[in-house]
């Protein structure tokens, strides 16, 4: 799990990943043992909170 997380962070830093990371977040939670349905719900909830806050998560 640690190696997966480090590899994903390196991919983000290298600019390889440039989507909204929702599938990546879900896959990481599933790899950590969270059931798929719960992982999806959690990521959608967190994404909606992030998107509702102006300037949050956009590097400003």
Image (cartoon, rainbow, N blue to C red):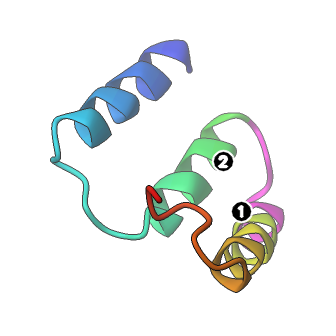
Give the percent coordinates (x, y) of residue 49: 77, 75
**In which quadrant will I find the N terminus?**
top right
Q: Residue furthest front?
A: 60
Q: Residues within 10 Å of mark 2 (few under 14, many from 20)?
A: some
Please tell me which residue is depicted at 41% across the width and 20% down the height of the picture.
6
Please tell me which residue is depicted at 70% across the width and 34% down the height of the picture.
32
CB contact under 8 Å: marks 2 and 1: yes
Task: State the image quarter where residue 21 is shown.
Answer: bottom left
Residue where numbered disc 2 is placed: 30
Q: In this view, does 16 lie above or below 6?
A: below
Q: How crowded is mark 1: few (under 14 residues within 10 Å), some or many (20 or more)?
A: some
Instruction: Give 28 or 20, whichever is nearer the viewer.
Output: 20
Q: Judging from the image, what secondary structure is the residue with disc 1 in?
A: helix
Q: Which residue lies furthest to the top in this view?
A: 2
Give the percent coordinates (x, y) of residue 28: 57, 43
Instruction: Give 52 or 1, whichever is nearer the viewer.
Output: 52
Q: Is the magenta stretch mostly helix, strand or loop?
A: helix
What's drawn in magenta, residue-wise? 33-40
Question: What is the C-alpha distance between the residues marked 2 and 1?
Answer: 6 Å
Instruction: Give 37 or 51, whichever is nearer the viewer.
Output: 51
């Amino acid at each position: 799990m640690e190696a997966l997380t480090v590899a994903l962070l390196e991919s983000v830093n290298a600019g390889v990943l440039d989507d909204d990371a929702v599938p990546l977040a879900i896959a990481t939670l599933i790899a950590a043992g969270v059931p798929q349905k719960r992982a999806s719900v959690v990521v959608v909830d967190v994404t909606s909170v992030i998107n509702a806050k102006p300037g949050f998560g956009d590097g400003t």
